């Protein structure tokens, strides 16, 4: 790698973002993966309630059974990792679950 390329790479990394192919200093904790899974389940619940398009297809498909499963799974997963979350994360997930449940009942 030329000196110019090395300097450019250093400049691009100043903001702290990982570049493709770089390794992390620490492994990602399971609770962080599970938190992201909660957010994915939330998205699936909204999509199956037909309130947003499905991210994978950009099409609408209503299935209240799938929406309920996503909400229930989100709730169970939240209870599993609740102790490891920050107070702000707990409040955020509780608010998201409440919004999903209220919209589910309306549908």
Image (spheres, rainbow, N blue to C red):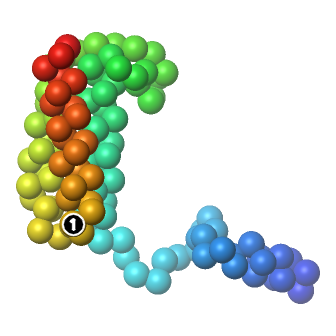
Q: Position of residue 43 (x, y in %)?
A: 34, 35
Determine whether, in the image, residue 45 is placed left or right of residue 77.
right
Image quadrant of residue 46? top left
The residue lying at 75 percent from left, 81 percent from top is 10
Residue 1 in sight from this viewpoint: no
Q: In this rendered view, identify the residue nearer to me: 76 or 57.
A: 76
Image quadrant of residue 33? bottom left
Above or below — where is 93 with respect to 44? below
The residue lying at 12 percent from left, 45 percent from top is 75
The residue lying at 11 percent from left, 37 percent from top is 72
Which residue is situated farthest in the bottom direction here? 3
Above or below — where is 68 with respect to 23? above
Give the residue at mark 1. Answer: 87
Above or below — where is 24 with respect to 53? below
Secondary structure at badge 1 equals helix
Quarter of the image that includes the C terminus: top left
Quarter of the image that includes the N terminus: bottom right
Q: In this rendered view, identify the residue nearer to me: 6 or 40.
A: 40
Determine whether, in the image, residue 11 is placed left or right of residue 88.
right
Q: Position of residue 38 (x, y in %)?
A: 26, 48
Above or below — where is 63 with respect to 74? above
């Amino acid at each position: 790698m030329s000196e110019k390329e090395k300097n450019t790479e250093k400049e691009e990394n100043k903001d702290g973002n990982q570049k493709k192919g770089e390794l992390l200093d620490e492994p990602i904790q399971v609770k962080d993966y599970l938190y992201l899974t909660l957010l994915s389940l939330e998205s699936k619940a909204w999509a199956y309630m037909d309130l947003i398009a499905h991210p994978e297809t950009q099409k609408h498909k209503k299935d209240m059974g799938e929406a309920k499963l996503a909400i229930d799974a989100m709730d169970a997963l939240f209870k599993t990792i609740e102790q490891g979350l920050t107070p702000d994360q707990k409040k955020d997930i509780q608010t998201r679950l409440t919004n999903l449940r209220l919209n589910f009942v309306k549908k």
